[in-house]
Amino acid sequence: MFLFRLALRLGRTVGELERTMSYGELLEWHEFYTLDPFDEARGDLRNAMLMSLLANVNRDRKKHPKAISFTDFMPFHDAEKNRMAAVERERAEVLHLPKKVKVDPALLTYMFVASGVKPPGTKG
């Protein structure tokens, strides 16, 4: 699924990305996506936070003493709760794509260490 998101974001087809993008560049794009997602979930979150702010500023504190959560305004909150699990699944998909170029082992080690995951084949 990550390739489809990236293709949509870059205005290219999945086939074009598969033919022209190196494995190393794909890993870098995926790492960027894990830090700063570029899909609609981010926009939904921003809007939900704004709506909860407006609702809380204007609520009757006697009738509604508990603050209204931004999750009350998330259209797909359950799906958003599972987004990080999906990102981890996509990371596994990216790591198992056919390699078109040799990937620098230091880049893979950095990617694992930066994400807090023990690199495969390490002792400990």
Image (cartoon, rainbow, N blue to C red):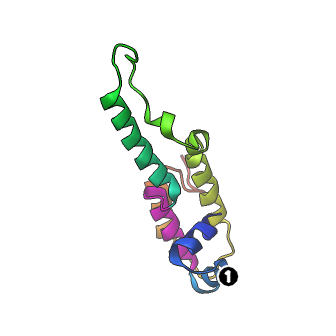
The magenta stretch is 22-38
Figure quadrant of residue 68: top left
Above or below for 91 versus 67: below
The x and y percentages for residue 82 are: 60, 43
State the residue position of label 1.
15
Side of 58 relative to 92 (left or right)? left
Q: Is residue 52 magenta?
A: no
Q: Which of the pair 91/79 is nearer the observer?
A: 79
View extreme (left): residue: 57
The x and y percentages for residue 22 are: 56, 81
Q: Tag 1: residue type?
A: Gly
The x and y percentages for residue 36 are: 43, 58
Name the chief secondary structure element in magenta.
helix
The x and y percentages for residue 31 are: 48, 63
Q: Which of the pair 15/93 is nearer the observer?
A: 15
Residue at 33% across, 18% down: 61
Q: Is residue 30 magenta?
A: yes
